[in-house]
Every structure is written in structure tokens, then in C-alpha cells.
Image (cartoon, grey):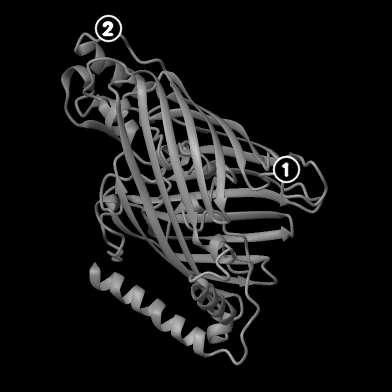
Amino acid sequence: MRFNCGIFVAGFILLAVHGALGQSAPPALPNSPLIGTPLEPAVRIANDLLNEGILMRLRYVDAFAANPTGGLEQGADNSGVVILGSDFDLNRLAGVPGGQLHVSIAQLYGHELATDQIGSRTKVQTYYYPYKQFELTEFTYEQAAFNNALDIVVGRANATGEFARSTYGCQFENVSDCPFELTQLVAGFPGFPYVNWGGRVRVAPTPDTYIKAGAYQTNPLRQHNTGFDWSIDNKSTGFVAPVEAGWESDADGMPRHYKIGTWYNSADYTNPDLNTKDKNRALFGGAAMPVAGGRSGIYALGDQVVWRPEAGSNRGLALFGSAGVPFDSAEVYQFEATAGFVWSGPFASRPRDQIGFQVAMLELGRDEFKYLNGLLGKVHSPTLLARSEALIEVNYGYQIMQGIVLQPVVQYLVNPDDINKSAAKMAPLNALVLGLKLTVNANALLGLPQQLPGVRRPGALE
């Protein structure tokens, strides 16, 4: 693995040298707070590479959370990620019009409060994954044609970066909408950082509308390797095929995104309430009863900027919401919905700060609910789980400087489940969570775009 990472870093160094020396005249520098500081050479090298068709990407996110009350016990945890990647414009580099190559790796670390102390399946910290800590998170080829009316992506990819992707969900510390929890956990969409073989085709009948369909390999063992096992026969159990249609527009300076989608997952799954002998699994134990594949469901997401203090400003209030349901009852969750707002530039003196508010509501699947409460009843728990649960978050994103945001967070979990602590002796109590999230976006810091020109790729880094 060190060899792979070393090749990646060495390649960046060689490209940087080529970019720095290959310009006949210095290009105009981007708007970066690093101009005039000892780090200005980094801005120049990154800008040289961009002008040659190579966009470097780097992001660091660290999330701390503690629950002074509630859950199964009190504690504090910290987790985070470093994401490094690059996008290559193959038209500039190799004369392939509309071609791009996308590569990303990630280093993850830390522990997560919901997993360790609260018990809930829905994480209250960004970027925690319990298995391999170093991951290949993207290696895809993209081809656009007909003035971006047709766009194809194929390779080592994840579905949650392309489908059911919220515009604002990742601006919160909890991950109920980053990605949309239902499509990752219930529909089986491969999600960051885990990539499988797959891809999607996107057709844009008009500049503001699109229809896209994808197919991604399902592999329950994928989380146990780092993504560099590229074999086709690698314990795959089937495929998941999402389809999504959307309308996106900002022609009037008030951006909005509306999308609706569905999925089909061919992989077999299990009924959590029954064992292979058709008996109550909470009482009699045993392996969960297998169920033949063929799961499906629907989802919808929408957001819109509804107010700006002045025309042409980046300040304003955006509302967002989402909802999704599977079409069967043998699932961890039977329903999820989110709603909230992001207020950008709440104060004229702080135009790049943000206030965020979000409510996420989830309902346990019928069979999962019976199984978890059956386990609690078996140990004579004084309390049982409620089928419906909610997670509320409010945060303030304080921009320290362009590209660096510090975000104090308050979350409250109502009726949290105990999926991550199924051996618990009681149902988790409502939990207050205090958090602090730090995000360093090197592209914004260096004055670089978040992606190369072309088709908008939501969640390309995540």
C-alpha cells in the first residue's frame, strides 16, 4: 500500500515540476489568501497544473463529539479524513475531447460517538468507518459528448456520489443526509469511501433537466479491503441499479435542485427477525433467514434558495428536504426524511459564515424493530425502543479564512436506536451531543475550482 501511495505522490511531484517549468509566460494567479505569503509557490504550482489540465484536490475534515447526557453511556470521540485526488482534462493532456480521469484516495482515522457510546446506527460525526483506514475512493473515466448532453462515468466508483445526493447535507456534522442514509444502508448504494465496479449514464434533454441511470456491483466484503482489489470475481453478490431524474437551475440567481429516483438491488439479503429455521431470532439465535434479492424503493430530494438580502449576492437562505421509502419491510429502516435550512452570510460583516439547521426522522423497519426489542426483552430491559427516531442539529460555520471553516455543533437525538449496541441492557436515552467540526478545503484556499469544467458532479470527493 505504501508503494501505491508513493507512486501517487511521486506522480504529483513530477506533474508539478512539469507544470511549473512548462509555461512560456506566468498565468494570472487565482484569488487566494496565500498570495504574498511563503505558501504562494503552492498557489503558482497548482495554478500552472490547472492551466495544463490537471486539477489537484485536497480536503481535510476533523469532527469531535461528546454526549454529556443520554445514550447508553457518556463519552467523547474524534474522527476525520484526509482526501487527496486529481482530475485530468484529457482534451488538454491527450487530445480526447470531453474526456476526464478522476482519481482520489483517503486516509481515515478515529472513533465515533454514536457507535461507541450512544448505540445509534446514524453517525453524529462525519467520516468514521470502522474497517480499513486507507482507501482508494475513486478511479473513474468520464466521457462527455454533444455539448454535455450525454455524459458517461465508469470505473471504481460509488453510487452515493452520483445518486440521491443532497446539495447541503454534508454541511452538517451528522451524516443522516451525507449521503442519504436510506439509500446507502437500505438500498445498498456503495458509498464513500468504498468503491466498487460501476458507472452511470447521464442524458440532459435540456440544459436544466437530466435523467441518469447507473449500475454498481454489490459486495458486502468490500469494506474489508482498501479498494485496490480490482478483480471482477471478488465476492460480488449482485448489483444495484439506481435511476434518477432532476431539474437544476440558477438562471434567476436563486439556485434550486429537485430530483426523484428509484433503485433496484438484485443481491440477496436477510430478515433480521427470523432465523434460518423460521423462528424468532432474538429468542432462539442463529443466522438470519436469507431473502431472495429484488429490493427496490423510491426517494426524492429538493432544495432552493428562497431569499437574498440583495441581488447578485452569495448571501441568502436555502431550504432543503428529502424523503425515501423501500418497498419491503425486512429492512433496517422503513422510512427516512430530512428538512432544514442553510443561511449563508447571516451577518453583513460575516458574509461567508453559515448557520445550519436540520431535522432527520427515521423509522425502523418492522422486522428490525421486532428483533431489537426482542433482544431487550430477553435481558429484561426496563425500557424498549420506539420505532420512530429523530436527530436535530444546529451549527454555525465560522470561516477563519477562505477555505478554512470551524463549526460548533449542537445535536439532539430523540429515541435513538441501539443497532450498533445490540447487546445493550436497556434502550438508549435521548442524547445531547456537543461537537466541533473543522474543514480545510485546499482548493478554496488556493483559489482553485472544486472540479474541472463540464458536467456538474455532486459529491465527487465524497
Question: How dense is the environment of label 2, judged by Cα within 10 Å: few (below 14), some, or many (20 and up)?
Answer: few
* Observer-nearest of 89 and 373: 89
State the SS at label 2.
Answer: loop
Q: Is residue 380 above or below residue 289?
A: above
Cα separation, mark 1 vs mark 2, equals 52 Å
Marks 1 and 2 in Cβ contact (< 8 Å): no
* Observer-nearest of 454 and 461: 461
Q: Is residue 140 visible?
A: no
Residue annotated with mark 1: 348
Asked whether, in this view, residue 245 is left or right of residue 75, the answer is right
Amino acid type indicated by mark 1: Ala
Residue shown at 41% from the left, 34% from the top: 124
Task: Report the residue that reaches farthest toward the bottom.
Answer: 24
User: Residue 414 at x, y = what percent?
Assistant: 44, 19
In the picture, the disc for residue 382 is 2
Label located before the other in sequence (1 or 2): 1
Residue shown at 62% from the left, 89% from the top: 25
User: Residue 128 at x, y = what percent?
Assistant: 35, 44
Q: Is residue 86 above or below residue 210?
A: below
Which quadrant: the N terminus? Answer: bottom left
Residue shown at 56% from the left, 42% from the top: 397
* Observer-nearest of 145 and 45: 45
Q: Is residue 241 above or below residue 281?
A: below
Asked whether, in this view, residue 323 is left or right of residue 280, the answer is right
Quadrant in the rendering for residue 205:
bottom right
- Tally of numbered discs: 2
Residue mark closest to the camera, 1 vs 2: 1
State the SS at label 1.
Answer: loop
User: Residue 436 at x, y = what percent?
Assistant: 44, 38
Amino acid type indicated by mark 2: Pro
In the picture, the disc for residue 439 is none
